[in-house]
Image (cartoon, coloured by chain):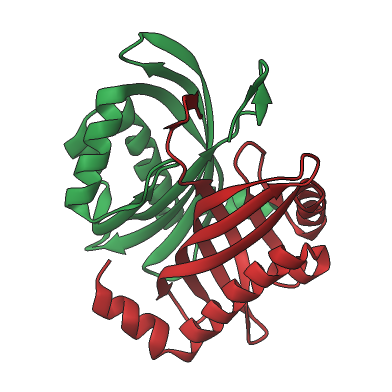
Chain colours: A red, B green
Amino acid sequence: MNGLVHELATVSSPDAEAISTVLHAYGAALKARNVEEVLALYTTDGVIMPPHFPASAGIDSLRASYTRIFSTIELVITFQIEEIVLMSPEWGFARTTAEGTKTILALNESEPHANQELFIMKKENGKWLIARYAFSTMKPLVQNGIQRS
Amino acid sequence: MNGLVHELATVSSPDAEAISTVLHAYGAALKARNVEEVLALYTTDGVIMPPHFPASAGIDSLRASYTRIFSTIELVITFQIEEIVLMSPEWGFARTTAEGTKTILALNESEPHANQELFIMKKENGKWLIARYAFSTMKPLVQNGIQRS
């Protein structure tokens, strides 16, 4: 988007800085594969929309979803923040890309990871939290002769 | 989410109804494979985040992205609205699922289509428009022995 707006939004606003901090904390919780640490970053009605699975809405459903994810894969990724936009005193969104390594635990196989993310953030009791989270792979549709879908 | 909140949000608010109308117009524009009809539903700084491709930001980039999409596939899908939330007088979001048929034009092959979508909507000059749009497939990770990624 507009580089200046991006910079102003991410540098000069305490709210944007707080949102950025939450996103990096989320990356750290993924790396640690710590379900409760992840859940503490979500609103109680939070929703994740993971590719290939129906959305998980609410803390109990999120717990089941992250328990599944962390039992299957290890993610060591870093979020690059493309933009943070404040929509109201209580709502913001962040668009990010994440690169790093995904390890399939059962196979002990690692591969490069490249996703893009859209986070809707909500400020509750003075704390920015993840309210909705959608993402998708940025891997090419066809790679090494394998057609992805 | 909460069925009652969902119903109130989608039934009783003129803004939520207007957002719903835009989403169904988007579905119709996809079916018609009409690039300009799609672009008219986006803000000028709108962003699509299509799986397997980097985000396309701004009308020119969106035009290129939809031209590519419509030259490759035909989508006949219907959006089911899971929730619409108004975040401020100018911002809202919608979470949807879309089912229907995707046809790969080069192969003339059709397959069932099931995606989930997160739309961030912005009201500009009295009209709700798509500001950010992320989505992913809901197809199982492994299907007919094919591992998807």
Q: Quadrant of the N terminus of chain A?
A: bottom left
Q: Residue at left 48%, top 44%? A: B135
In depth, the one of B118 and A70 nearer the eye is A70
In depth, the one of B24 and B34 nearer the eye is B34
Relative horizontal placement of residue A1, taking residue A42 as reference (left or right): left
Q: Residue at left 78%, top 51%? A: A61
- The image quarter containing residue A43 is bottom right
Residue sitting farthest toward the top: B108
Image position, residue B19 (x, y; %): 40, 50
A98 is higher (above) or lower (below) than B29? below
Whether residue A125 appears in this view of the structure is yes
B81 is higher (above) or lower (below) than B18? above
Q: Residue at left 46%, top 68%? A: A80
- The image quarter containing residue A31 is bottom right
In depth, the one of A145 and A40 nearer the eye is A145
B145 is higher (above) or lower (below) than B79? above
In depth, the one of A3 and B14 nearer the eye is A3
Whether residue B128 appears in this view of the structure is no
Relative horizontal placement of residue B12, taking residue B70 as reference (left or right): right
Q: Residue at left 56%, top 67%? A: A78
B3 is higher (above) or lower (below) than B147? below
Image position, residue B99 (x, y; %): 52, 26
Count of numbered circles in the view = 0
Image position, residue A72 (x, y; %): 78, 45
